[in-house]
Amino acid sequence: MFSEFPPSLLMTASQYQLLEHKTRRLISLVCFPSCSTCKTVCCNKAFCEESINSYWLSFIRHVVSCGGGQYDEVNGWLSPHGCQLPAGRPPVCYEFICNKILTAVSSKPFWDCFKSLTMLLTYAGEKALGNEHLITLSRRQIHTKIKLAKLEKRIVKAIDLYHEYEKTLFLFDEINLLYNGLRHDTGFTLVTHK
Ligand code: SF4
Ligand code: SF4
């Protein structure tokens, strides 16, 4: 299905995947204490379906990523251990931060930076073609209409912003405590519950 993809598009996808990987890890770190004990997990199959219906997100999942769990017709990507989708998640999955997490955050500067971090995947795909977001574009639009150089520039800018946010967040003790507690656990994910 994706074998005919030009190298330039594969390279852009690879950068998007890098951005997603970094962003997911850092958001997961902050959310882990709340999500790991949550009894009312906010995942919704309608969001999971976006990852299937979006050409870009399917592309990311199939071409760039490897591994991950099986999509379930009832529960989508959600398993008893959290989201099984390592790449190509809908940006909304990173954007949503519930009150439980909000109240656990210690200060407004931390929150402001963290909120910007949660918007990075949305930012990266904004106005990929006219006013349309990258994840809404069709196969034809992605292959023949988008300006790859512009998209790549946007994703690189998002990666730069990621590094700024990471630096700022690690100025706070709370994230260093979480990091030191979890750094040996490579399996934690954005939405995880016991
Ligand atoms: S973000 Fe995490 S803690 Fe908040 S409702 Fe969703 S799963 Fe629960
Ligand atoms: S985080 Fe994963 S399981 Fe949850 S709604 Fe998004 S794709 Fe579905």
Image (cartoon, helix red, strand yellow):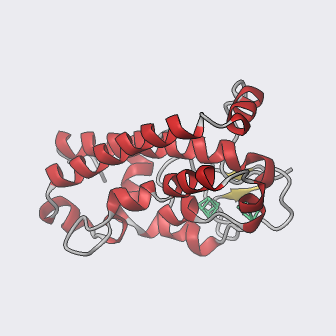
Q: How many marks do you count on the picture?
A: 0
- At 75% across and 32% down in the image, what residue appears? 177
14 up-or-down from 39: above or below = above
Nearer the observer, 163 or 4: 163
State the residue in front, 164 or 86.
164
Q: Which residue is at 61% across, 65% downward? A: 96
Measuring from the top left, give residue 148's x and y in whole percent: 17, 52
Residue 9 shows in the view = yes
The residue positioned farthest toward the front in the image shown = 108
Seen in the image, is 154 located left or right of residue 116? left
Determine which quarter of the picture holds residue 46: bottom right
Residue at 77% x, 55% y is: 104
x and y, in percent, of residue 84 in the image: 64, 50
Lateral position of residue 45 relative to residue 57, left or right: right
Residue 67 visible here: no
**Which quarter holds ligand 2?**
bottom right
Judge by depth and name the residue closer to the eye, 107 or 153.
Answer: 107
- Residue 182, quarter of picture: top right
Task: Please tell me which residue is depicted at 56% across the width and 46% down the height of the picture.
Answer: 24
* Rendering coords of residue 63 (x, y %): 37, 44
- Front position in the image: 75 or 94: 94
Give the quadrant of residue 56: bottom left
